[in-house]
Image (tube, rainbow, N blue to C red):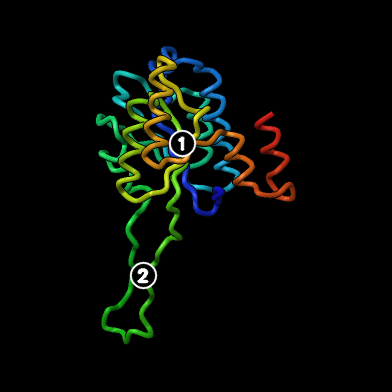
Amino acid sequence: MLLNAQECQLVLVDYQLRLMPAMRDASLTLVNAVTLAHMAELHKMPVFASEQNPSKLGETVPELRTVLEQAGAKILSKMHFSAVEEGLSELLRPPAKAPAGNARSLPKHLQKAVVTAPERNTVVLAGCEAHVCLLQTALDLLEDEFDVWVVTDACTSRTERNRDAAFDRLASAGVELVTTEMVAFEWLRTAEHPAFKTIQGLIK
């Protein structure tokens, strides 16, 4: 099973100013998170980010926040470790909206249909710490019946042991583990894709 860009949404968890300096391999992890956000923007994909207790841990680091703004991302502030506890699932799967000005008195064939956005049930997820906020968010998304793919080289923890334990547990739970380059080429599918050269430049 390959990722389909038309069915995906990107969620980036807690890449924050006071958190990243304590993370293992923080620079490379952040580069990959920025790359994911750039690629999602090129695919016109919905993008979301979270910030854990931002008054204490700071906002998203500037280099990522700039790309998130370009992509029109929604940023969710949270206190729970799982972003799902703070409403992430509702953002990923918004309810259908009835069109404004629909006259209920009109015959049914003249009434406007309820507007339903195309469903994107696959969540591509990355963040930190892998064994805390990322893990809990991923498992809760599974509970809410999303297909969850975690981008391992865009995730980190303070220690390698904690990060790897998170990946083992996620895989056992049914999460697909991928890398940034795997995501890149599965979203593209072909070298004839209009964004191929741009994305190839991002991952080199």
Q: Residue at x 26, y 83 (%)?
A: 105
Identity, as a three-letter code, of the amino acid under mark 2: Val
Decide if residue 171 is on the left or right side of residue 179: left
Task: Check the picture and name the quadrant holding the C terminus.
Answer: top right
Q: What residue is disc 2 on? A: 114
Decide if residue 42 is on the left or right side of residue 99: right
Instruction: Name the mark on residue 63.
Output: none
The picture places residue 153, in percent across and down from the top left corner, at 53, 27
* Lower position in the chain sequence, tag 1 or tag 2: 2
Q: What residue is disc 1 on? A: 150
Q: Secondary structure at mark 1?
A: strand
Residue 113 in view here: yes
Q: CA distance from mark 1 to mark 2?
A: 33 Å
Residue 47 in view here: no
Query: 158 or 88, which is in the foreground?
Result: 158
Up-down relation of residue 6 to residue 199 (above or below): below
Q: Residue at x 43, y 23 (%)?
A: 164
